[in-house]
Image: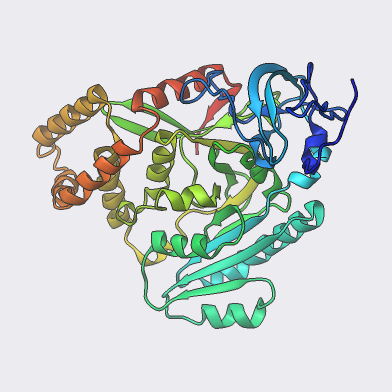
Amino acid sequence: MTATVLPGRPRWARFLRASSWPTSRNGAAITALPTGLIQPAFWSPTGKWPRGRIRSWTLHPQSFRSSAPGFHRTWTAGLSPSSLRVSCFHVSCVVLARDRWHNLVMDVSIVIPTWKGRHLLEAYLPSVISATEFYRRRNGAQAEILVVEDGGGDDTPDWLRSCYSGEVLTLEHKRNQGFAAACQTGFLAARCPVVLLLNNDVRLKEDCIEPLTEHFRDPLVFAVTGKIFNQNGDVFCNGGKVARFRRGMWSTYENYDLFPWARPDLSLLSFSAVGAFSAFDRDKFLRIGGFDPLLFPVEDIEISYRAWKRGWYVKYEPRSVAYHDASQTIGRFFKRRTVEMLSRRNRILFHWMLLHDPRMFWTHLLTLSGRFLISWLLLDWRFYWGIFTGLRRLSYIRAKRRENRRTMVRSDREVLELLERFYSSAPIALRKA
């Protein structure tokens, strides 16, 4: 077959390889260069086409994700990258070696919200800078660090500007606005398509950024969460998040990790992205409005479920490792009882906003009704506090519920079935945090 480079043909097109290439509309054959296979971003983990049948799409660098070597799929599609127009064709794809992705590397912004946390930044910010420099050197990518000081009233901003003026961009709130607002400020200021969100008490392993960013070549990925150990590195804290719909509510307290013999670069699903250490698609995060400020401290669970229902995916990347001792800021300034009460109430409100399947929602309401009748026997006054304070925000909840129904692509039942299929087929094991 004669290979002809068409005018305006993108550099990345040389990686494409097909079993039977047609000619373009002007009659010229399409170039295909050597080894490596690619998987289409539109092939879902369930093996089904999302949103019905997709006959064509626009192909661009972020439309691919790597797969395990030996993975082989065929599909039919239409291709129209920039000036190159191709009629429908049959493609056999294989895996593209990692070292061939050098011109598809994702630029990344690292956003760190902080509040009265200079002592934590002094301890852990150097590891973030080291990981950022490692990512730049290894990939030639752009990377930036943004610290959002959320009106703590201490000298953190001055200290950052004096010690890290050339390495860290400091953003400052005049008054405390909360975690969700600080994240929103950071995402709006970020200049890169991928944003790595970190707590100020997280220490990064030097090579942790690249595996996270690889997933965003798939345009359906919303977020990727990594593996977290305690600061000593001897206790597993977070992995892929497992969710089960039990007794009328999503139970999200379980974690999983890969079996030791499994390939570490498999495509793995996670119910939610952990707010302490996860990468997000910036455009998608801002498009759906960011974290809901009402739902502290379960805002990361809520936004992840919102993304699932928008038709996107949340992934787990076990090769990306960080170290984190939870609640080093919250524990210093808030009573544990207060945080537990807010968490319990907001888990209920999250269901009122996002649970639309009739059977699942009625199961939820019946469960709450039963709890309402017996909690006084258990002296569980926090449950009543959560219900009554939640009802005071009913107008806000109804507005969010209508908005989420209008933008829904996947139903609750479809999300549940997709996750159950993954849990039953993937080489994973539950792990206690």
Please say if 369 is above or below 8.
above
Q: Position of residue 102 (x, y in %)?
A: 80, 45
Q: Residue lying furthest front in this view?
A: 26
Residue 318 placement, left or right of 296: right
Q: Position of residue 22 (x, y in %)?
A: 77, 20
* Residue under the image location 62 percent in, 42 percent down: 216
Please say if 216 is above or below 328.
above
Please say if 234 is above or below 44.
below
Q: Nearer the viewer, residue 294 or 156?
A: 294
* Residue under the image location 62 percent in, 50 percent down: 322
Residue 37 placement, left or right of 79: right
Q: Nearer the viewer, residue 149 or 326?
A: 149
* Residue under the image location 27 percent in, 46 percent down: 400
Residue 424 visible at all: yes
Q: Position of residue 145 (x, y in %)?
A: 62, 65
Q: Residue lying furthest right in this view?
A: 2
Q: Nearer the viewer, residue 210 or 290?
A: 290
Q: Position of residue 97 (x, y in %)?
A: 81, 33
Q: Nearer the viewer, residue 118 or 50?
A: 50
User: How many circles with numbers are drawn on the protein?
Assistant: 0
